[in-house]
Image: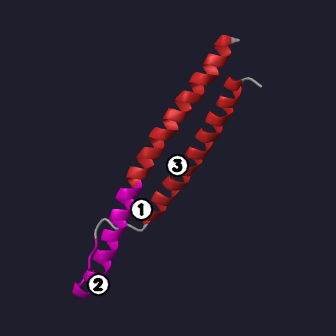
Amino acid sequence: MAPESIMLEYLLASWIAVTAILIVLVIYGNALSTREDDELYLNRAEQVMMAAEQNVLIRKMSRLARVIVGFVILSGLLFAATAGVWAWIGLSN
């Protein structure tokens, strides 16, 4: 087996793994966003408890958004590298 085809297999496996993680993170982010309320109508007692919970949820979602963007970039780079190696193998044969 040629070294180029081994490299192609590793790149493809890496891309599949990163994309699978990305899909799981997006699903988790959507599950978190269903718990977020756009407007809360609370009395004083509920406001302390629920507002703190919403703030924690919003912080989680903003951190998750940065992680998702990183995985999108990584997935795109791996896909481009895989396509490049595949084209290079095709043109060299």
> Is residue 53 magenta-colored?
yes
The relative height of residue 93 versus residue 4 in the rendered view (above or below) is: above
**In percent of the image, x 55 and y 32: which residue is there?**
79
The C terminus - image quarter: top right
Pick the front one: 36 or 83: 83
Q: Residue at x 33, y 64 (%)?
A: 58
Tag 2 residue: 46
Q: Which mark is residue 22?
A: 3
Q: Is residue 64 above or below residue 57?
A: above
Vertically, is 74 above or below 28?
Answer: above
**Of the residues shown, which amino acid type is indicated by label 1?**
Ser
- Tell me if mark 1 has few (under 14), some (14-19) or many (20+) residues whose alpha carbon lies within 10 angstroms of its own: few
- In this image, 18 relative to 60: left or right? right
As drawn, the residue found furthest toward the bottom would be: 45
7 vs 79, left or right, is right
Residue 13, given in percent of the width and then of the height, sits at: 65, 40
